[in-house]
Image (cartoon, helix red, strand yellow):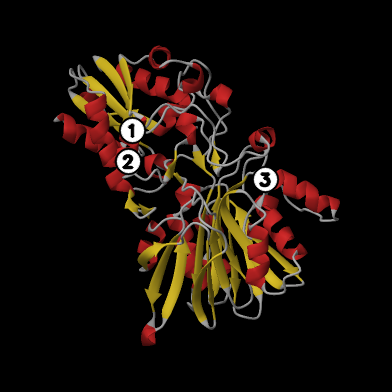
């Protein structure tokens, strides 16, 4: 409905808790914003591994009777957003198999840039794939490995894949997590203290999942690191040398919840800094009121208002209970999709010079509808401010983005975009200021490919990635 990028999934894992399935479910509930198409849990009691996954939202799928059928002390979970054509149960995660190395279940957040080549190689050797997800490639690589030890087989598989992945895997009595050598996608580590001084280990895409279950954030899984938790305790080891760091900056711009710590940094703090720096770079001298485009523009708008000394007002109200709608009115009701989700507070806008703060403009169609809505509510002027640079290139590392031809900033100047969205003025946060906002002015730890077109890895087949992104 909204013209936004979509994060393709979130992962959760827990080891050493008698209610592992229940806590993993709660963690997925906190990560629901990262994917709403399907979700699943895989749980083991040390002898038997069970998996349950369905299409839909976490709370609708994991009813108490379902959780009750998933006993065990080790669990992994996954919630997924899929691209068009991939919304099928076969692609829901975790993937669970019974092979020569025992019962295994795996899930991951990211996108393997050489998955098509590896799949073709495996199929030529007789492998039979059940889904179109690149995650299944990892399982086949492990199954083909001559290594008997599960961790060694996984290490061998990971050394063959390229791209972005934060991966969680369980076997009958152990949990293994791993993160790609560039560290594209986040993977946080936490601990939960049990009675008797015992420790349960938890891992998640964002720390907001820890807050819900009472776990304490202790740090991140490092790029190129594998963490193994089993009956003998926990071990951490490098399966590959870290490469040039490439944390996804869009985690801080838009994807992650503001109450999370991602890549060791508060998301809320980053976004408020983006807003403050945006106010310096692109001031709006005539502004009467600063209005966020909810919900992702709120933190940046707070920062902008603070820096500009202009009142912040929640003048666009979001309906949080809107799902998909299959019955739309006639064309006579303009901009129905946006009206279904947003409604203006007219007395806050009437006669005012309004600064609308949003996190991004993708195609521009939704931005234009919001500008029209604010004008129709009586605003005297409407100025748009975007808390990131113009998005000019698609992502191939686990984010569902339009093609370059569909990205308005890839094909138009800022002035042309301003005219298209019908704003009185338009300003973007410059790239150096975005780097400053996320604390990356010196080290260059983040990936900015969507703003620069400079990708941190070799893209094996851009054409296949465009047609079959997803995990």
Residue 6 picture location, percent across and down: 50, 40
Q: Residue at x 35, y 68 (%)?
A: 214
Instruction: Name the secondary structure under disc 3.
Output: loop
Q: Looking at the image, is mark 1 or mark 2 earlier in the sequence?
A: 1
Left-right relation of 280 to 154 = left
If you read the primary sequence from the N terminus, does the residue marked by circle 2 or circle 3 appear first?
3
Count residues near mark 2 (Cα–Cα under 10 Å), then give few for <14, some for 14-19, many for 20+: few
Disc 2 is placed on an element classified as: loop
Contact, mark 1 vs mark 2 (Cβ under 8 Å): yes
Question: Could you tell me if residue 442 is visible in this image?
Answer: yes
Q: Is residue 322 above or below residue 206?
A: above
> Few, some or many C-alpha atoms within 10 Å of disc 3 (few <14, some 14-19, many ≥20)?
many
Q: Are marks 2 and 3 in contact (CB under 8 Å)?
A: no
Residue 259 visible at all: no
Q: Residue furthest bottom?
A: 196
In this rendering, position of residue 413 left or right of residue 105: left
How far apart are labels 1 and 3 at the CA level? 31 Å
Q: Residue 77, how many percent across, how many down?
A: 55, 61
Residue of label 2: 441
Q: Earlier in the sequence, mark 1 or mark 3?
A: 3
Residue 432 - label: 1
What residue would you read off at disc 3?
Answer: 114
At x 48%, y 33%, the residue is: 450
Residue 143, quarter of picture: bottom right
Residue 153, image x, y percentages: 68, 67
């Amino acid at each position: 409905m909204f013209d936004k990028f979509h994060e393709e999934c979130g992962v959760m894992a827990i080891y050493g808790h008698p209610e592992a399935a229940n806590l993993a479910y709660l963690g997925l509930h906190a990560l629901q914003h990262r994917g709403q198409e399907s979700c699943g849990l895989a749980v083991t009691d040390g002898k038997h591994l069970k998996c349950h996954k369905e299409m839909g939202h976490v709370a609708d799928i994991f009813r108490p009777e379902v959780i009750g059928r998933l006993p065990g002390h080790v669990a992994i979970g996954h919630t997924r957003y899929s691209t068009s054509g991939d919304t099928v149960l076969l692609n829901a995660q975790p993937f669970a198999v019974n092979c020569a190395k025992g019962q295994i279940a795996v899930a991951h957040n990211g996108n393997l840039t050489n998955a098509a080549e590896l799949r073709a190689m495996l199929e030529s050797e007789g492998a039979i794939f059940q889904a179109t997800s690149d995650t299944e490639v990892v399982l086949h690589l492990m199954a083909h490995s001559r290594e008997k030890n599960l961790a060694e087989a996984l290490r061998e598989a990971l050394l063959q894949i390229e791209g972005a992945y934060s991966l969680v895997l369980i076997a009958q009595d152990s949990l293994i997590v791993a993160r790609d050598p560039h560290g594209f996608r986040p993977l946080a580590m936490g601990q939960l203290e049990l009675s008797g001084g015992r420790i349960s280990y938890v891992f998640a895409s964002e720390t907001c999942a820890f807050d819900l279950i009472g776990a304490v954030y202790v740090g991140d899984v490092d790029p190129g690191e594998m963490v193994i938790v089993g009956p003998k305790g926990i071990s951490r080891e490098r399966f590959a040398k870290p490469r040039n760091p490439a944390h996804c900056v869009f985690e801080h711009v838009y994807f992650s919840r503001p109450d999370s710590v991602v890549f060791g940094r508060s998301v809320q703090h980053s976004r408020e800094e983006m807003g403050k720096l945006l106010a310096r770079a692109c001031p709006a001298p005539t502004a009467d009121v600063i209005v966020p485009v909810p919900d992702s523009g709120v933190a940046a708008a707070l920062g902008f208002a603070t820096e500009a000394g202009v009142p912040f007002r929640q003048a666009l109200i979001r309906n949080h209970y809107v799902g998909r709608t299959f019955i739309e009115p006639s064309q006579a009701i303009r901009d129905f999709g946006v009206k279904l989700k947003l409604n203006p507070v007219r007395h806050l806008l009437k006669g005012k010079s309004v600064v609308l703060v949003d996190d991004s403009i993708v195609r521009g169609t939704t931005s234009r509808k919001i500008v029209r809505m604010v004008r129709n509510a009586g605003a005297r002027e409407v100025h748009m401010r975007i808390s990131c640079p113009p998005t000019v290139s698609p992502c191939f590392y686990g984010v569902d983005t339009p093609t370059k031809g569909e990205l308005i900033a890839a094909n138009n100047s800022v002035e042309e975009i301003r005219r298209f969205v019908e704003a009185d003025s338009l300003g973007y946060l410059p790239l150096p200021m975005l780097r400053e906002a996320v604390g990356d002015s010196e080290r260059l730890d983040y990936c900015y490919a969507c703003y620069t077109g400079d990708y941190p890895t070799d893209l094996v087949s851009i054409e296949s990635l465009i047609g079959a992104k997803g995990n």
